[in-house]
Amino acid sequence: MALEDLAAVSTEPGYVFFFDRGLIGAAVGLEHLVGEPAAAKFASAPVFPKLFLAPPWPEILVTDAERRHGFDAALTE
């Protein structure tokens, strides 16, 4: 799905201001979930030329059906 998202915005002119999840992040999450290596398969995945990381922000962390882990698990990930 991350590759599809990347392909969908690759033809857009200008900058993509915010892209929430990347392919590597999704693969690492899968590794954590099932315990089988996945991230190494994507070592040759497209790389974003510029990116930023936002620091953890506990005040805005919300758990719901899709976001079931707490703040400590989010920090680990």
Image: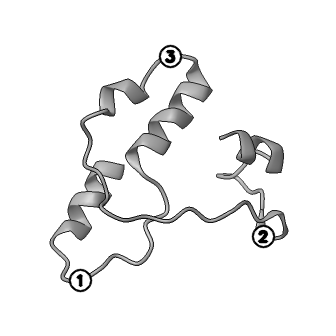
Eye-nearest disc, 1 or 3: 1
From the viewer's perspective, is residue 14 above or below residue 20?
below
Tag 2 and tag 1, C-beta contact below 8 Å: no
- In the visual, does 68 lie left or right of 58? left
Residue 60 percent across, percent down from the top left: 78, 70
Q: Which mark is residue 36?
A: 3
Query: Circle 2 — which element?
Result: helix
Q: Which mark is residue 60?
A: 2
* Outermost residue to the top: 36
The first of marks 2 and 3 along the sequence is: 3
Q: Quadrant of residue 16?
A: bottom left
Query: Circle 1 — which element?
Result: loop
Q: Nearer the viewer, residue 61 or 43?
A: 43
What is the spatial separation of the Cα atoms under label 1 and label 3, in whole angstroms? 37 Å
From the viewer's perspective, is residue 9 above or below residue 38?
below
What is the spatial separation of the Cα atoms under label 2 and label 1, in whole angstroms? 29 Å
What is the spatial separation of the Cα atoms under label 2 and label 3, in whole angstroms? 31 Å
Query: Circle 3 — which element?
Result: loop
Residue shown at the point (31%, 33%) measured from the top left: 42
Q: Which mark is residue 47?
A: none
Visual colour scheme: one colour
